[in-house]
Image (spheres, helix red, strand yellow):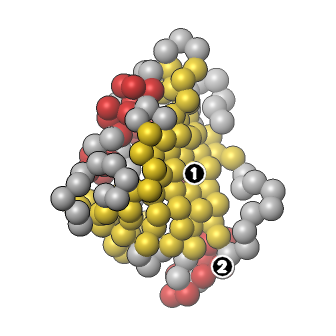
């Protein structure tokens, strides 16, 4: 959701959310059409430029784009650092990109680009994450959701500045 200024806002998890999962939804309005936004985000390696929690990305496949691309993302949230392994599972240019988290943190993530009036884009980011027991499992998910929502809202502000 947006507040009319283009600033990202977070939504509460949807009704019927899965216990033990951190379900995070953030969105913003970008001052560019979906094709221009896609041209920026399809370079997965560049996500470290606007995601504060993403320190480095290393590809595990020869592919750098599209379904089947696998990569490691060194992630840092406060004192916690880990390597998140992801595989791209959805690739619809100018519409959506989806990933499976197949490392220590499990779950799914998805960017959705929707054209809106004035040649702008509604950018939605959703993640459904399961935390390992050493990160508190369901308790870690409960407390992690507001922290990650805050970080990802800031990430969307950085993405917004790219347009």
**Residue 51 screen position, x and y as percent:** 38, 50
- Whether residue 26 sits left or right of residue 76 in the image: it is right
117 w.r.t. 95: above or below: above
- Residue 155 seen in the figure: no
Can you identify the residue that label 2 sits on?
A: 138
Q: Quadrant of residue 16?
A: bottom right
Give percent across and percent down for residue 87. Answer: 38, 62
How many labels, in total?
2
Which mark, by number, is residue 126? 1
Is residue 91 shown above or below 79? Answer: above
Q: In terms of secondary structure, where does tag 2 sit?
A: helix
The residue positioned 31% from the left and 63% from the top of the image is: 70
The residue most toward the top is 118
Q: Nearer the viewer, mark 2 or mark 1?
A: 1
Instruction: Pick whichever, 146 or 120, lies toward us.
Output: 120
Residue at the far right: name it.
15
Please tell me which residue is depicted at 41% across the width and 75% down the height of the picture: 103
Instruction: Tell me what residue is drawn at x 62 percent, y 40 percent.
Output: 9
Quadrant of the drawing holding the N terminus: top right
Residue at the far left in the pictured view = 62
Q: In whole angstroms, how far apart are the C-alphas of marks 2 and 1?
A: 18 Å
Q: Is residue 140 visible?
A: yes
- Where is residue 50 drawn, in percent x and y? 35, 44
Q: Kindly identify the residue that appears in the image at 42 percent across and 45 percent down.
A: 91
Compared with 26, 123 (above or below) is: above
**Picture coordinates of residue 158, whole percent (x, y):** 40, 39
Pick the front one: 11 or 93: 93
Point out the image quarter for the C terminus. Answer: top left
């Amino acid at each position: 959701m947006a507040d009319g200024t283009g600033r990202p806002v977070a939504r509460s998890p949807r009704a019927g959310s899965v216990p033990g999962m951190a379900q995070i939804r953030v969105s913003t309005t970008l001052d560019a059409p979906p094709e221009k936004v896609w041209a920026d985000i399809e370079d997965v390696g560049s996500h470290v430029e606007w995601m504060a929690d993403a320190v480095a990305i290393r590809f595990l496949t020869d592919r750098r784009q599209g379904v089947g691309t696998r990569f490691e993302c060194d992630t840092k949230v406060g004192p916690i650092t880990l390597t998140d392994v992801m595989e791209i599972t959805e690739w619809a240019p100018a519409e959506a990109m989806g990933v499976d988290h197949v490392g220590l943190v499990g779950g799914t993530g998805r960017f959705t680009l929707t054209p809106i009036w004035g040649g702008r884009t509604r950018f939605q980011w959703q993640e459904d994450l399961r935390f390992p027991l050493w990160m508190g499992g369901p308790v870690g998910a409960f407390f992690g959701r507001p922290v990650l929502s805050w970080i990802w809202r800031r990430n969307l502000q950085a993405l917004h500045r790219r347009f």
